[in-house]
Image (spheres, rainbow, N blue to C red):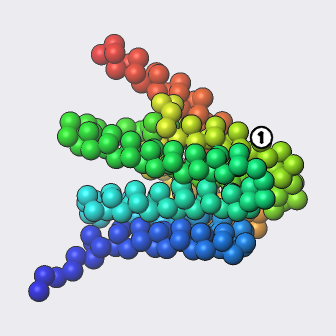
Amino acid sequence: MKKIDFKVLLPNVITLAGLSFGLSAIRFALEGNFNLAIVNILFAGICDVLDGMLARLLRSESDLGAQLDSLSDFLSFGIAPGLLIYMSIFSQSSSIGAFACLAFIIFSCLRLALYNVRLESSKALDEATEHFFIGVPTPMGAVLILLPLTHSFMGYNWAFENLNFVAGYIILISGLLVSRIPTFSIKRKQFFIHSKLGFLVLFSLVSLSMINFLWATLNLFALIYLLTIPFSVIAWQSGSNRGSTQ
């Protein structure tokens, strides 16, 4: 009997844990427990980061893991947030909300398919890993479309009074998923804090903020991410210009 290689198995187990959180988010959305649904999507995001980090650290990356990761991402960051937004904001409204949520789910699927195609092409050409994503990653897109709902948890109910605006915002984020806009890739880049003490301080601050001020912290991170997009475009263009002059 062939011995089980836990080094290969562990990242896939974490991916399946993320899938379980995504399924739980759908369950809580259907039950009307929208707070817990978002929390489960956030846990799925943590698993999405951890499985890739472990696979690279243990050198156990595999085609099976890549396919599992894409399928888990589609459910956790495409279907789950799209359904959650529809159930929480648009369930009693006109069809524009249903169209916006459906567009987000479809564009999430397209984005993941395009990402897999680019990944296979880079493997075939033996290209070096880039420090950018093309378009907004699906997990970040999920966070962005959930912001109107998180505002209601903080007492700001503007989303329910501006359904057409929210639908337009979701469609805009959906377009960014499959856009050609370069965005920074935290997964592929070395962490910018090299000091262990600095990392621990930052991790502690972020953890305390998420525990005590979850919705405000989530909105702050989303705002910071949006503000980095112009800088990522500049960095991308700068790198392209250097490459063309060499």
Percent position (x, y) of residue 104?
58, 47
Where is the C terminus found, in terms of image quarters? top left
Extreme residue toward the bottom, this view? 1
Q: Which residue is drawn at 36% across and 63% down?
A: 68
| 151 or 7: nearer the viewer | 151
Residue 74 image position (x, y, % from top left): 47, 57
**Residue 98 in view (yes/no):** yes
Residue at (88%, 59%) from the top-left corner?
Answer: 155
Mark 1, Cα crowd under 10 Å, few <14 / some 14-19 / many 20+, is some
Residue 88, x across and y down, in percent: 74, 62
Residue 63, percent from left and from top:
26, 58
Residue where numbered disc 1 is placed: 165
Which residue is depicted at the point 59% across and 69% down? Answer: 26
> Helix, strand or loop at disc 1?
helix
Between 62 and 175, the one lying in front of the other is: 175
Q: Quadrant of the N terminus?
A: bottom left
Instruction: Indicate left or right for 132 with 38 as reference.
Output: left
Q: Is residue 89 visible?
A: no
In this view, the residue farthest toward the top is 245
